[in-house]
Image (spheres, rainbow, N blue to C red):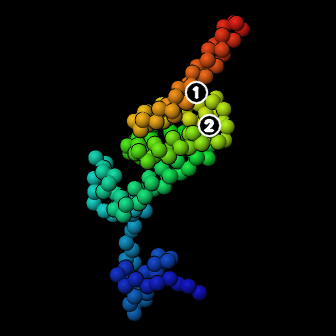
Amino acid sequence: MDFGTYNNTIRCNIKERRPYITNNSGLYNITYIPTNKDTMKDWDDFIPNDDDEFSNEDERDLFGTHRLQQEIEKGMFLQDADSGHPLVLDPPEFKELFGKITEDDLQHLTQSFFTHYHRLNVSVDDLFDRWGGDWIFEVLKHCERREEYELCSIIKDMWQDKKLKVKDIELLIRVAE
């Protein structure tokens, strides 16, 4: 039978919060210290800080786990781009979550984009659906900065094909009306 541990400061069984007999007269010494279960909402309520006012996230990241988590999620995003999954973040959202888009990130995305187009023969429509115009434009700007004009011309041709298909769809819609 487990009775818990005895705490000398409050003279009660910690597990059951039942007072012990602490003197010979047979009377119970009922010294119960109430806990803050009802008022405590978070583990850092024991630390004096300004939670309600301007909180700084960097102060909460004492061990650098937030930055590690960011790197892991950024790697997962790039891995999803390699796998052919739709890119769920736009470039502004990417910048907000992970910071500035680095040259390595853009190089990785460019390689992934052209791998899908050339090696895996993904259609232009599927590429535009998965990547979105914003990311394709970022890849185009990256290729221009690196002076890879052949890749720029491929993207430009893809863009023209997409525009022609959109015009054909618009024509079909007008005819159907």
Q: Residue 115: where, in percent of width, then height?
A: 60, 42
> Would residue 29 be seen by someone viewing this image from the given angle?
no
For disc 1, the marked residue is 158
Give residue 73's position: percent from left, percent from top.
49, 51
Label 2 sits on a secondary structure element that is helix
- Residue 100 placement, left or right of 160: left
- Frontmost residue, 165 versus 6: 165
Q: Is residue 93 above or below residue 17?
A: above
Q: Which mark is residue 117?
A: 2
40 lies above or below 149 = below
Residue at 41%, 45% in the rendered image: 103
Q: Which residue is drawn at 37% across and 79% down?
A: 10
Circle 1 residues within 10 Å: few <14, some 14–19, many ≥20: some
> Mark 2 or mark 1, which is nearer the start of the sequence?
2
Q: Quadrant of the C terminus?
A: top right
Q: Residue 170 versus residue 73: which sits nearer the camera?
A: 170
- Depth check: 17 or 93 in front? 93
Give the farthest residue toward the right: 176
Q: In this view, does 86 lie to the left or right of 15?
A: right
Q: In which quarter of the image is residue 38?
A: bottom left
Mark 1: amino acid: Met
Q: In this view, does 137 lie to the left or right of 33?
A: right
Residue 112 lies, with reference to residue 28, above or below; the image says above
| Proximity of marks 1 and 2: CB atoms separated by less than 8 Å | yes
Residue 165, x across and y down, in percent = 64, 19
Q: Can residue 164 be seen in this view?
A: yes
The residue lying at 51 percent from left, 33 percent from top is 150
Placement of 62 over or under 99, stated as above or below: below
Tell me the number on the disc at residue 118.
none
Going by the picture, which residue comes out furthest to the bottom? 24
Looking at the picture, which amino acid does disc 2 mark?
A: Tyr
Image quadrant holding the N terminus, namely bottom right
